[in-house]
Amino acid sequence: MEKIQKSRTTDCNELQAPPKQQRLTICLISAAVFGALGSSFVYGYNLSVVNAPAKHIKAFYNVTWLGRYKEPAKTETLTLLWSITVSIFAIGGLVGAFITSFLIKVLGRKGTLLANNSLAIISALLLALGEKAGSFEMLIIGRFIIGVDSGVSLSVLPMYLGEISPCEMRGSIGQFNSVFICLGVFFGQLFGLPEIFGHEDRWTFLFGFLAVPAILQLCVLPFLPESPRFLLIERRDEARAEKAFQAFLGKKDVSADLEEVHAESRAQNTLQVATPLELFQNRAVRWQIITIVVVMACYQLCGLNAIWYYTNGIFEEAGFHKSTIPYITLSTGGIETVAAVISGLVIERVGRKPLLIFGFCAMAVCFTLLTIFLNFQDTCSWMPYLSFISILAVIASFCSGPGGIPFILTGELFEQSYRPAAFMVAGGVNWLANFAVGLFFPFIQEFLQTYAFLVFDAVCVFGAVYLYIVLPETKNKTFVEISQSFAKMNKVSQEPDREMEEELSVKPGKCNTGPDCTAVENDRKDCNSIAKDGVVEMESSF
């Protein structure tokens, strides 16, 4: 009897197929490309698009003020209107981040992305037609609405991409978010050239273009599946979840993937979507939420946004003519894009943690060098060129890790029921820090002069040290395994996680061929007993 059991166990083990390497599917690539095109690209585009037409917009404000009140606007008034136009984008982003949890609960991940395009189109119309209508209020409202659009998309897209990707590709697919942000910045700079839309007669087309990526997403995304994890855990629709997995993974047998999600669902403390308050109160996710707050704060406070304050001045000091500076500025957008693409190609080999730590450390070194070069800029004719190279190095370092991985981590560190609240918190920190940089950096710059970047130096060093001590590597790990990595730090019992680990250790379909294993395929309980005890019990024979 014992010999027969051992023989059958061996036969079944021999029949276990080796794991196949996951391939990219057209459905997965389409979701990543068109999802990011209508979301991340729009956000990046709006970061840079207002720079080129700034003087034309101010002139429009002045003409409109003169037409209404029969006198030119004061300098303080124009500065205030322009400041509101620029900064209200971040306020809109904060609002968008706060309403994301409600939207995805009602509309789902894909549905929220699709509905969000309506905001981009409305904003494009307001911004493009404001000049013809003689209303600077339309521009301000349009900037607020596109801010809301960006706040929603920066929360929903990383969530969607993380949930549709196999764990061995989650980082690479997630980096589409960062790559398209950089592409958006680059195209905002490119279209702002005087030969394209940067002329005083064509600057409104810069904002009208916002509708194009939104329309392209509306043409493709409706034909792609919803997040299978959302469908299975929150909608309880296993049939649609199975079809979604099949489409994204490119295989018919997705029983193992469904079982993994079922196991995650069974082991969760709650199946209800948590609120941000519940997230902060739950000890089981305490260090995850602290990590996300720290990483997102460092993402904005590391100084990349502030570096644009110095760029034009450094280029002028280097001897470049003012008319050529817009073309040279394109190099910064190009460096961003190249660094983000390289990061996406190596993230699954190198890991999230090393790229983040390297990025922050490299930025700290480059900021130190930039401070030195700025202090000696007037001593040598070639010193401004070194400052320019330092700026490019800072940008490349940022995009190699800190520029995109924080959004990936937000989706990876939390299980399904906590993920929407986590993205709401991360989005709130992101936009508040963004607003703080724009508000306080001019005062820091005025007080510290060329030493202003040492503040960001300290932020980068703090971020690198914190991540080295606290963050576990998440590469090629399931969401459950990542939660287990934090269990000891959170001082919570690991028993539920062990139960889930047992659930996940069973891979349906492993023992699925051969005459002795037919009964096992028909009865999953028998297959579970094989995985746990290594013994095949054949009901028909014994």
Image (tube, rainbow, N blue to C red):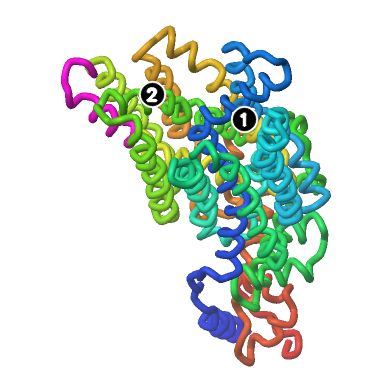
Relative horizontal placement of residue 126, taking residue 454 as reference (left or right): right
Which residue corresponds to the image point at 59% horizontal and 30% vertical from the top-left? 293
User: Would residue 195 be seen by someone viewing this image from the given angle?
Assistant: yes
The residue under the point 59% across, 74% down is: 250
Q: Position of residue 249 (x, y in %)?
A: 60, 70
- Answer whether residue 283 is visible to the viewer in this image: no
Q: Quadrant of residue 224?
A: bottom right
For the N terminus, the quadrant is bottom right
Residue 137, how many percent across, how many down?
72, 28
Q: Foreground residue, 518 or 244?
A: 244
Coordinates of residue 154 in the picture (x, y in percent): 62, 43
Q: Amino acid at mark 1?
A: Trp
Residue furthest to the top? 447
Label 1: how many residues lie within 10 Å, few (<14), some (14-19) or many (20+)?
many
Distance of label 1 from label 2 (alpha carbons): 22 Å
Say what secondary structure mark 1 lies in: helix
Is 378 included in the stretch rendered in magenta?
yes
Amino acid bearing label 2 = Tyr
**What are the residue bounds of the magenta stretch?**
377-393
Residue neighbourhood size for the residue with mark 2, other residues' Cα within 10 Å, grouped as few (<14), some (14–19), many (≥20): some
Quick check: 162 left or right of 329? right
As drawn, 273 above or below 291 = below
Q: Nearer the viewer, mark 1 or mark 2?
A: 2
In the figure, 101 relative to 514: above or below?
above
Dot placed on the residue nearer the N-terminal end, 1 or 2 = 2
User: Residue under circle 2?
Assistant: 310
Q: Quadrant of the C terminus?
A: bottom right
- Helix or strand or loop: what does disc 2 sit on? helix
Answer with the quarter of the image where residue 297 lies: top right
Q: Residue at x 60, y 17 (%)?
A: 78
Q: Which residue is mark 1?
A: 431
Q: Residue at x 79, y 71 (%)?
A: 239
